[in-house]
Image (tube, helix red, strand yellow):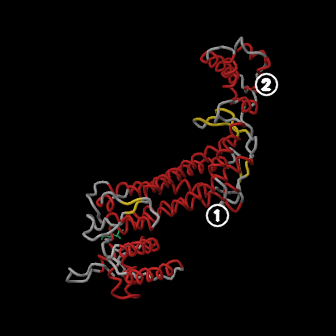
Amino acid sequence: MTLWGGRFSEDPHEELMTFTADRSDRRLLQDDLLGSAAHTRMLGEVGLLSEEEARQLVEAIGDLLEEAREGRFEFDDADEDVHAAVERRLHDAIGPLSGKLHTGRSRNDQVALDLRLYLSRATHRRVAQLKSFGRILADKAEEVGDTVVPSYTHLQQAQAIPLAHHLLAYAWMLLRDIERLEEAERRIAISPLGAGASGGSSLPLDPRIVADELGMTGTFANSLDAVSSRDFVAEYAFCCAQALTHLSRLGEELVLWSTTEFGWVTFADRFTTGSSALPQKKNADIAELVRGKAARVIGDLTGLLTLQKGLPLSYNRDLQEDKAAVFDADDTLAGALAALSGMVASAEFDPPAPSSWVTALDLAEILVERGIPFREAHQAVGRLVARLLSEGKTLAEVSAGELEAAHLSFIPEDLEIIDPKVSVERRRTAGGGSYVSVLDQLAELRSLLGEA
Ligand code: ARG
C-alpha cells in the first residue's frame, strides 16, 4: 500500500513499485512503532488528539509492537515501506482513527527518527561486543605471561617485547572504537520529529515531548538539516569500518602467525577450516574473512558519503539507500566480533624466541648510558653487526673481545644483555614493551572494559 493516492488518476505501475519500494527498512519496525507511540502521546498532550483517541491509538500501536517482538507482524509485498505497512495494519485494527497518526508528521522526519533509534540501540550492542572482545585479548595477554617475541617494523624483527604487549595494542585500538561509537551516539540520539516534510508544521507540535519520551538527548535546530542529513549514518558506518579495519589488521597477523613459517599460534579445530583438496590444511578462515569483510564495510562507508555528496536540500528519495549500507556495516562488524572472539579465545601461543639481533639497540643504549653520543654508539654496533653477518654469526655468538673491539666503552659483562628476555627486563619507558608496562596496561584496560 502507498500513503499518497489522492492526487493520482492511475495506480502505480508494477515496475515503479518494484524499483522504489523498500524492504531493507523492515528491521526498523519496532523503532517505527516506538516513535509512533511517542508521537501519538505528544499529539494527545498538545490537544491535537483527544485523550480517548490518543489512548486508543497508543494501545493499538502497543499491540503491533507485541506482534513485532514476537515476529508475528505480517508485511505485504505491496507495502511501499515500513511506515506504510504500519499504517495499513493500524487501519485494519482500528479503522479511520489510524488516519490521525500521521498528523504533523512526514515519512521524511519519521524515517530519520527510526534510523536514529535503531542506531542508538545498535551502538550499545556493538560496544558490549567490543568490550567483551577487549576482555578476551586481556585474558590472552595474561595467559601468555612472560613470553617474549620480536616487535616488527617493516616486517623485520625490531626489539624484544612481551607477546602480551603486542596483544594489548589491539585492546587499546578497540577501546578507541568503543569511545568513538559512544561519542557518535550522542549525535545520533537527536530527535528529528516535528521537522515534518521539510519546513515544520502550522500545528502546535512539541518536539521536546517526543524526544524526552524516547530518551533522546535533544531535538533538531533546523528542520531541513533534520530531514536531509545523514552524517550520523556515515559516522556510524565509519565507526564500523574503523573497528573492522583494526580487526582486519589483527586478522592478518593471526593468519601470518599461524603459518608453518611463523609457528606462533594454533587455533582450536572448531574455529578453523579445512581444504577440500589438501588433506593437511588447517586454515584461519575467520581471520581471512574478517580481512575481506573489512573491504566491504569500507565500501558501505564510501557509498554513504557518495549518497550525500551533491544532494540538494532537503529530503530526496536517494536517502532510502542509506539503510541497506549501514545495516550491512553494522551486521558485518557484529558477525566479525562474534566469530573472531571464539577464535582468539581458543588460541594457543607458543612462539619461538626472537633472534639475538633484537638486542642490538640495547647494546647501543649501554654506550649512551656511558656518555657516548647515540650516533657514535649506533655506528659502532652497526659495524659489529656487519662483521658478524659477514662471518655468518649472530649477535649471540659475539665474544667479549669482539665486543670491546667494537667500542672501547664496552665491557665483558655487557654480553649479558644480548638476551631478548634481559632486553625486555631493562625496558623502562612507560607504555613500552616491558612487563611492568603490561601489568599497568592490564589494570587500566580491565577497569575501562569493565566486567562481563
Ligand atoms: N522509505 C523512505 C526512506 O527510506 C521513507 C521516506 C519516504 N519519503 C518520501 N517523501 N517519499 O527514505
Residue named by callout 2: 416
Left or right of 436 in this view: 109 = left
Quadrant assignment for the C terminus: bottom right
Instruction: Check if mark 1's residue and mark 2's residue have beta carbons within 8 Å.
Output: no
Q: Position of residue 315 (x, y in %)?
A: 29, 63
- Residue 156, by quadrant, is top right
Q: Position of residue 173 (x, y in %)?
A: 57, 46
Residue at figure coordinates x 48%, y 78% from the top left: 65
Residue 353 is marked as none
Residue named by callout 1: 276
| Observer-nearest of 350 and 429 | 429
Neighbourhood count class around disc 2 (C-alpha, 10 Å): few under 14, some 14–19, many 20 upward: few
Q: Secondary structure at mark 2?
A: helix
Quadrant assignment for the N terminus: bottom left
* Label 1 CB sits under 8 Å from any ligand 1 atom: no
Residue at figure coordinates x 40%, y 54% from the top left: 302
Q: Up-down: is 169 above or below 234? A: above
Q: Position of residue 192 (x, y in %)?
A: 36, 63
Which amino acid type is marked by label 2?
A: Glu
Mark toward the start of the polypeptide (1 vs 2) = 1
Left or right of 218 in this view: 159 = right
Which amino acid type is marked by label 1?
A: Ser
Q: Up-down: is 257 above or below 227? A: above
- Quick one: which residue is furthest to the top in this view? 408
Q: Up-down: is 120 above or below 238? A: below
Q: Secondary structure at mark 1?
A: loop
**Label 1 to label 2, Cα distance in Å?**
50 Å
| Observer-nearest of 30 and 299 | 30
- Residue 268, by quadrant, is bottom right
Left or right of 204 in this view: 233 = right
Left or right of 127 in this view: 25 = left
Q: Position of residue 62 (x, y in %)?
A: 47, 80
